Image (tube, rainbow, N blue to C red):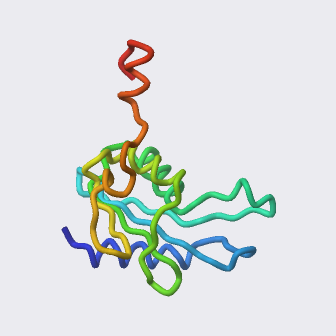
Amino acid sequence: MDWEALRSKAREMTTRAYAPYSHFPVGAAGLVDDGRIVTGCNVENAAYGVALCAECGMISDLVAGGGGWLVAFSCANANGDRLMPCGRCRQLLWEHGGASLLVDTPAGVMTMDQVLPMAFGVAELEEVSGEDN
């Protein structure tokens, strides 16, 4: 795994962020199981609650590009520091990378199940509905 390449892409994406309110640009990059790198940046809005996190943009890039399964993820601020994804974004990462997704955290690389223990996912939906999702 070339973590420096992934970190570099995340840092690059901070330059594309739209953060006129917080002045806190964030970039995200993920490695897909087919070798692609997907990216995203935060996009703020005057109505703060509808801002989009960088991870949201990255997941959109993943899905729009044909889908796949994330195997590694990194997120950075404008200084190049590694960031932890927020709760909503951790759930998005779980949905598209699962328990074994490698997450580049400020404390080092961790698996997604370490970052989001006891996550809610498709298995819980199927358990109740009895349907494959």
Residue occupying the far left of the picture? 1
Depth check: 73 or 87 in front?
87
Q: Is residue 21 left or right of residue 54?
A: right
Q: Position of residue 127 (x, y in %)?
A: 38, 19
Position above or below: 36 against 7: above
Residue occupying the far top of the picture? 130
Total numbered badges shown on the rendered structure: 0
| Residue at screen point 49% across, 73% down | 13
Q: Dividing the picture into quarters, in which one does residue 104 lie?
A: bottom left
Q: Dividing the picture into quarters, in which one does residue 6 lie?
A: bottom left
Residue occupying the far bottom of the picture? 79
Q: Is residue 23 left or right of residue 40?
A: right
| Residue at screen point 49% across, 71% down | 27
Position above or below: 117 against 20: above
Depth check: 133 or 29 in front?
133
The quadrant of the picture occupied by the C terminus is top left
The quadrant of the picture occupied by the N terminus is bottom left
